[in-house]
Image (cartoon, rainbow, N blue to C red):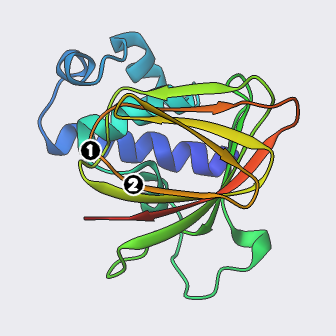
Amino acid sequence: MGHDLDGRLAARLAELRQARDWSLDELSRRSGVSRSTLSRLERAELSPTTAVLSQLCAAYGRTASQLLAEVEEESPQLVPAGRQPVWRDDDAGFVRRSVSPPQPGLRGELVECTLRPGADISYAGASVPGLEQHIWVFDGTLEITVDGRVHVVDAGDCLRFRLWGASRFRCAGADPVRYALVVVLP
């Protein structure tokens, strides 16, 4: 993330916690993220990993895209390619481009994702229970585990489901996997 976006995200995370009147200890208990990490995130000393962002979103009951859209400067109808926010977790091998970010009054969003070979990302639960997802693979092979069931999704294939629990995304091939993720709020 860019420096300005990191700062706005840090401020928004602090606002969300304070609006609930939660201490750092309480948020740590609810999210499973250490108190020291939460403190560093809120001071913009640290950018969240994919896993940490997922844990915080679950604690706050919103999707990662919703949270990231809340810190964007505006939500225009036309989103030129150069203005589509890109978020990277280099340690996890994950790049996320918000092609059509969330906008007030709209329930869907479109995200382009890329996982490098060997990337394996697990989410403990749905940030928003019943979240509808459609995953269309452009290049490579994506292994997705939803509710304990493993799906192998190859280029051109589309997997669609409602997410209620844990999920896992793994690049199953020797090449990166690039896919579109359509998210529809319940």
**The one of 149 and 115 positioned closer to us in this rendering:** 149
179 displayed left or right of 34: right
Residue at which label 1 appears: 16
Q: Does residue 44 show up?
A: no
**The one of 10 and 119 positioned closer to us in this rendering:** 119
Picture residue at 32% right of the left edge, 55% below the top: 131
Q: Which mark is residue 161?
A: 2
Residue 24 position, x and y percent, is: 25, 21
Picture residue at 21% right of the left edge, 16% below the top: 29
Quarter of the image containing the C terminus? bottom left
Quarter of the image containing the N terminus? top right
Q: Does residue 162 show up?
A: yes
Crowd band around label 1 with a 10 angstrom C-alpha radius: few (<14), some (14–19), many (20+): few
**The one of 183 and 6 positioned closer to us in this rendering:** 183
Location of residue 98 by image quarter: bottom right
The three-letter amino acid code for the residue at tag 1 is: Leu
